[in-house]
Amino acid sequence: MSLPKKPLIAEAASSRVLVQKWQAGEVKLLEDFVAEEVPVAMIYNGISHAVMLATPQDLEDFALGFSLAEGILSSPKELYSIEVVGEASGIELRMEVASERFAQLKDRRRSMTGRTGCGLCGAESLAQALRLPSNVNVSKEVFDKEVVLKALENAANQQVLQAETGATHASFWVQTTGEITMAREDVGRHNALDKLLGASAKQDKQAGFVLTTSRASYEMVQKVAVAGVSMLVAISAPTGLAIRVAEQCGVTLIGFARPQKFVVYTHPERIKLK
């Protein structure tokens, strides 16, 4: 049994592969599903700014969320159009943005090819590497611990691609009731968050917080702070820099979130623990 040969660049979020599975001394020939990642170029007014590796779904959300989080745009209204164009070597997200924003982008343009993990690749100076959000205006909601536990209980049901492939991260928008109203998945944790923030920016802002299946890096705290989100809940650990940035920006940062426990690292006044 064999599957037809596929092109190098995938168009779908997952694909089927033929595998040999060894278990308890037995070998079985099976079909499996794997998550896809493709080079995605962020192009502004005809100029390529960054190339990311991402799962090819929810790409318009990705383009907007990335643009807002990076400070390329200050409002969704400054993004006039997005065209998703498949090329032989990847996908281009061709965006038309406000001329003022494009001029500012050209002034600070830098290469960030492959920025999937460290968040600092391609920075030309220390000041560029550590971009603290300015004029942060996070919301003042207070959350009961039960809303975090409820979201954690229901998160797995929202991860369709993870259930199929076992290879993706997810970010969720959680309302003050604990209901998950939006989920985005990607092989990259930063990409999943960008997709979520891009999708939420298109809608009227709802009270709530972000839950992520990954660790909490400095860049993820920076992204939610720029978006005005008051709380980030991570299933894994935060970094020391993420904690210090969250403290400075007024973001409540929670890590090691599990069904019956979690750790509050910053601004505990925003969550009721008793």
Image (tube, grey):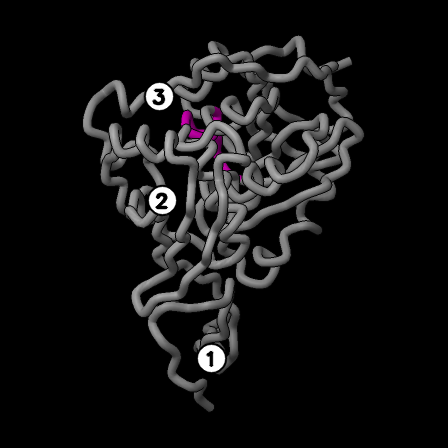
Tell me where the magenta segment starts and ends, as one range.
Answer: 214-221
Measured from the top left, where is residue 209 in percent x and y?
Answer: 65, 28
The answer, for residue 24, to whether it is visible in the render is: no
Label 2, label 3: how far apart the Cα atoms are: 21 Å
What residue does disc 3 label?
131
Label 1, label 3: how far apart the Cα atoms are: 51 Å
User: Residue at the spot x=50%, y=11% of the render?
Assistant: 247
Q: Amino acid at mark 1?
A: Val
Q: Earlier in the sequence, mark 1 or mark 2?
A: 1
The answer, for residue 187, to whether it is visible in the render is: yes
Label 1, label 2: how far apart the Cα atoms are: 50 Å
Q: Amino acid at mark 3?
A: Arg
Callout 3: SS: loop
- Res. 10 image quadrant: bottom left
Report crowding for label 2: few under 14, some 14 to 19, many 20 or more residues within 10 A (C-alpha): many
User: Residue at the spot x=68%, y=30% of the render?
Assistant: 205
Relative to 10, does residue 261 appear above or below in the rendering?
above
215 is within the stretch colored magenta? yes
User: Residue at the spot x=55%, y=17% of the render?
Assistant: 251
Relative to 14, does residue 162 appear above or below in the rendering?
above
Callout 1: SS: strand
Measured from the top left, where is residue 66 in percent x and y?
Answer: 44, 39
What residue does disc 1 label?
27
Q: Amino acid at mark 2?
A: Tyr
Q: Are the residues flagged by discs 1 and 2 in contact, CB closer than 8 Å?
A: no
Give the label, 1 or 3, closer to the camera. Answer: 3
- Res. 6 image quadrant: bottom left
